[in-house]
Image: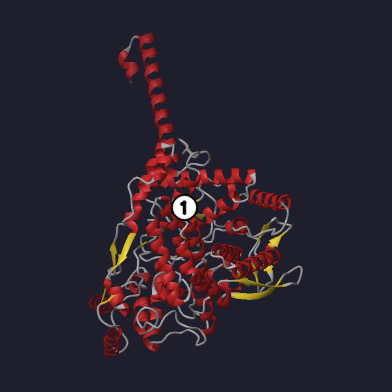
Amino acid sequence: MRMGMLNVYVCFFASVISAYAFGQDTSSDKYAYACDSKVYCQGLLLDVVQRTRIFQDSKTFVDMTLKYEPDVITEKFSQLYNMSGGRISRRALKQFTEDNLSGPGDELEEWTPADWTDKPTLANRVKDPRLRHWVLEINKLWKSLGRKMKDSVKDHPDRHSLLYVPNPFIIPGSRFREFYYWDSYWIMNGLLASDMKETAKGMIENFLYIVNKYGHVPNGGRVYYLGRSQPPMLTPMVGRYYDVTGDKDMLAANIHLLEKEYQFWMANRTVTVTAPVTGTRHNLTHYMVNLGHPRPEGYLEDVTLTDGLSKDKAASLYSNVAAACESGWDFSTRWFGGESLKTIKTSSVLPVDLNSLLAWNEHLLAKFHGILGNREKQQLFAQRAVLREGAIKEVMWREDKGSWFDYHMDTKQHNEAFYPSNIFPLFTNSYDTGSSHADRMKTVERVLQYIRNEGVLNYPGGIPTSLKNSGQQWDFPNAWSPAVHLFIESLSSTQHPEAEKMAQNITNHWLYSNWQAWKHFGHMYEKYDVRHIGEPGGGGEYEVQLGFGWTNGVVLQLIDKYAETIILPMAPTYGLSSEAIYAIVFVIVFTAIAVIGVVYVWRSRRCCAAKSVVYRCAR
């Protein structure tokens, strides 16, 4: 969500006057705060600083470290506020933050994982020398993204918004200075591809520690994220780690925490819905956040969005914006009821991907209990997976379209727009349970035809996150690593020859686009523009970020999967980057000038030879 400077200034003056006049939050009383911190989650100081926008990025202030106890700082601010008659100057406010806070990022130290190696075995399996060099360069990024908490985070937790965890971890990069939930699934897979099993295990143990303390994994490692989660990837993380290491002891010690996180989704995010055709009642899960005030890390953006709305409508909008953040797809027309972010209704949507991921969780929990010898629990979770798969089919599958679609509970209609998540039941094996192999292949063929009909294979830079260009970052023309990876795995996991061929083709183009961006700009990006090979994405609330954790992880995981067969093309197989176009234009122009010059000289010499008058020919 971008605002022109005029809108920013109008919002600034209006909101500051409102804050000074009332000094209170405008949310509805029925909603909760993300946390009880009077600095990081609520209170006058947060409100005035964020509305005044003394920092360009709203996330900066809430990532800073307090130099004194919170009560001391809030009392000092209250005195300053009262002495100024509620009209603190911008300069005085900036000085106050400099005197009382430091950072952001002061609570973390750079950290090189002990199990990092400059010669991961993956590099030896890659045939293409350019690809091998790229693997080694990405592998180096784990050192630049490694972080370790200072002791002060544990000793003085109230002075930090950072949530304490016992082990070091890998961050996504740039403004994302802390760990993030679903990002870490792909980061962990990249670490495993880099032979860094201990670092991966440490990150999993951090999440288990968080679940034990808070009952769920929050969106990210900050107190202001505690009110929301992200797509449930902890159990899949453990599943992936177990497949690589066979660590049964870790499984036995933590299975109860995996169940605890699963119950968070069942108890707090599950609703009963009637299937549109059969009328059968099913339990399915949605994103829903009980947050009725601006996100601390997106404060001014949320205040601007709700400008002019009533207290209750603003609170509802805040809640749905936070729910979109919980989805990981923040923001997208996927959650809209209309054309703009003001119409967002995330909580009314039953998402295909969330329920597919939870079916995957149920399958994995059944598998884990089987490994541990608990047959009763194994049967329980296997049955839950079957029930959810039946619900996904009856509520979300469209026979006439050949795909699954998100279901809007308020309108009782499917969102028929394309999103990569539409086909994720293929990846989690959440379709046609108990059907014959032939029937399952027919479903796959229907989905393949749906993909071709949507035309999403025609873009040179990857699979678009949607086909709607709304200016939001989880819409066209952006492609994101997790969505592309799960799309590829959805096709590959079917074991259908045509689907596997499609998956490999998408993989080739995705890796080539990522490689070209790295080659030209020297960075790995969080998102890419599908219209051009090697172009970073854009849109949304902030500039495209560098690093980048899950992009690195997906690249390494895909190379690990296709290491023996993938070779980077010498030139794009379709589509051209802007750099390539400029180069071609330069060559054409230079060649044309050269040809004209040669023709001119040749004709001049003929003229001179014919007339024997040198100076006339020269002129």
Residue located at (35% from left, 12% from top): 608
Apparent side of residue 592 relative to residue 441 in the rendered image (left or right): left
Secondary-structure class at tag 1: helix
Residue 55 visible at all? yes
Where residue 20 appears, as percent x and y from the top left, is: 36, 86
Q: Quick one: which residue is furthest to the right in this view?
A: 278
What is the quadrant of residue 426 in the picture? bottom right
Count the numbered circles shown.
1
Depth order, front residue of 383/30: 383
Where residue 464 appears, as percent x and y from the top left, is: 54, 54
Where residue 231 appears, as percent x and y from the top left, is: 52, 66
Residue located at (32% from left, 57% from top): 113
What is the quadrant of residue 121 in the picture? top left
Q: Which residue is mark 1?
A: 554
Depth order, front residue of 301/114: 114
Q: Is residue 341 above or below residue 559?
A: below
